[in-house]
Image: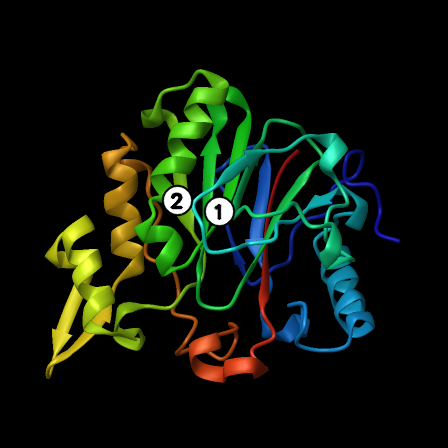
Amino acid sequence: MPEDTQTAPKKQSSLWEIPATWEDVRGGISSTSDGIVAWGRATERDIQINRVRFAESIGIRPESVVTLEQVHGADNVRVFQKDTGSGFLDPATRLPATDGSFTSESGLVLMTSHADCAPIFLYLPSKHAIGLVHAGWRGTLAGIAAGAARKLCREFDANPEDIYIAVGPMISTVSYEVGADVAAEFVREFGETVVAKVQGKSYLDVFAAIIVDLLRAGVKSARFCPRPPNTFSDPRWSSFRRDGDQAGGMLAYFRLL
């Protein structure tokens, strides 16, 4: 069993991590080398083994994790110690119908599952609070990023200018062809810069749309980390667009020390 990180946290060892300058927090995401971690892509037992192994590698206890059903919506929920253990080893116990969570409680681990969709890390050091969001194109179009920032500020009586943002590995524009109808919706909502037109085809920049959404919510541009790696073009990351049902998924995690 992994050691108790509340008393002796290990150094995280995931391939992609949040900035080291973010104090009193740890966060990152698993890679394909960590095995299949998405429910339904292997036997439940094999997925449980891979999840526990990954948890051990980053020094967290499975019973400290909170996971979400993830329905490609825009809802965010505040979570507490009573919610820990939700869904990490049993998908039936995930918190229902939500794609984002936030907390101010140390030792609790926020976790989301990804395979091209963006993991958005929200860090509010002034209130010792964090949030983690799963943002696909539907959730992004519905404003999940800005909604998470606003809710974080409401819950903790904070200013959006105090929020820091990092976005983990996700599919990039060059790899993300979408239909004309989806492209048109994004242009209407976020402006023409979020869609690239190449030889009559539309390529969606979800990262740019997330940034526009967060800027509208009052997050300062100086608080954003650089563009993340492209899941589609790098085999170290899981990509549903590239691998279909063979994509094993990735686990993003975020915790307060």
Give residue 168's position: percent from left, percent from top.
Answer: 45, 56
Quadrant of residue 103 within the rendered picture: top right
Residue 19's spot in the image, x, y percent?
Answer: 47, 46
The amino acid on which the numbered mark 1 sits, given as a three-letter code, is: Val
Q: Nearer the viewer, residue 253 or 46?
A: 46
Furthest-top residue in this view: 157
* Label 1 residue SS: strand
Residue 167 at what x, y percent from top left? 41, 52
Residue of label 2 = 144
Q: Residue at x 56, y 78 (%)?
A: 247
Name the residue tied to disc 1.
Answer: 133
Rendered-image quadrant of the C terminus? top right
Q: Is residue 72 above or below residue 218?
A: below
Crowd tier of the residue under label 2, counting other residues whose Cα lies within 10 Å: few below 14, some 14–19, many 20 or above = many
- State which quadrant residue 151 falls in: top left
Q: Residue at x 54, y 28 (%)?
A: 129
Q: Are marks 1 and 2 in contact (CB under 8 Å)?
A: yes
Q: Would residue 240 be visible to someone looking at this image?
A: yes
Q: CA distance from mark 1 to mark 2?
A: 8 Å
Above or below, 55 relative to 19: below
